[in-house]
Image (tube, rainbow, N blue to C red):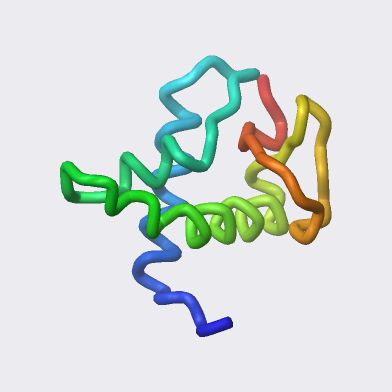
Amino acid sequence: MPEPDPHLTHHLEQVIMNLLDRRAATASICPSEAAREAYEGDDEGWRALMEPTRRAAWRLAAAGKVQVTRSGHPVTDPATPGPIRIRRANPS
């Protein structure tokens, strides 16, 4: 897997955190919301940002900033298949 672009990585992490900041403390977001928010076009190009967005979510989780969930339950293994959601690590 190619090394991620550090500027894109940082941008996606910021987008994820900004989306969470605009939600209720216990709310979660879908990675597609962050990919759409980060994408600067009006076509389906945001789809190319889905995997980088998931990787950004996992990096934030490793840093203790967010929690990745599946079916409302925390998961810690990025290799586990299935859709994910992202929420604050310590909701207030």
Q: Which residue is depicted at the point 47% across and 42% down?
A: 16
In the picture, measured across the screen, residue 15 lies left or right of residue 44, that is right
Considering depth in this image, is 1 or 11 the residue closer to the camera?
A: 1
Q: Which residue is depicted at the point 54% across and 30% down?
A: 29
Q: Which residue is depicted at the point 41% across and 49% down?
A: 14
Residue 8 position (above or below residue 46): below
Q: Which residue is depicted at the point 34% across and 41% down?
A: 36
Residue 88 position (above or below residue 68): above
Residue 20 position (above or below residue 82): above
Q: Hey, which residue is sitting farthest front in the picture?
A: 44
Placement of the C terminus among the 4 image quadrants: top right
Q: x, y percentage for residue 24?
A: 54, 15
Q: Quadrant of residue 78?
A: bottom right
Q: Quadrant of residue 19?
A: top left
Q: Hey, which residue is sitting farthest bottom in the picture?
A: 2
Q: x, y percentage for residue 86?
A: 62, 37
In the picture, measured across the screen, residue 70 lies left or right of residue 65, that is right
Q: x, y percentage for residue 44?
A: 28, 47
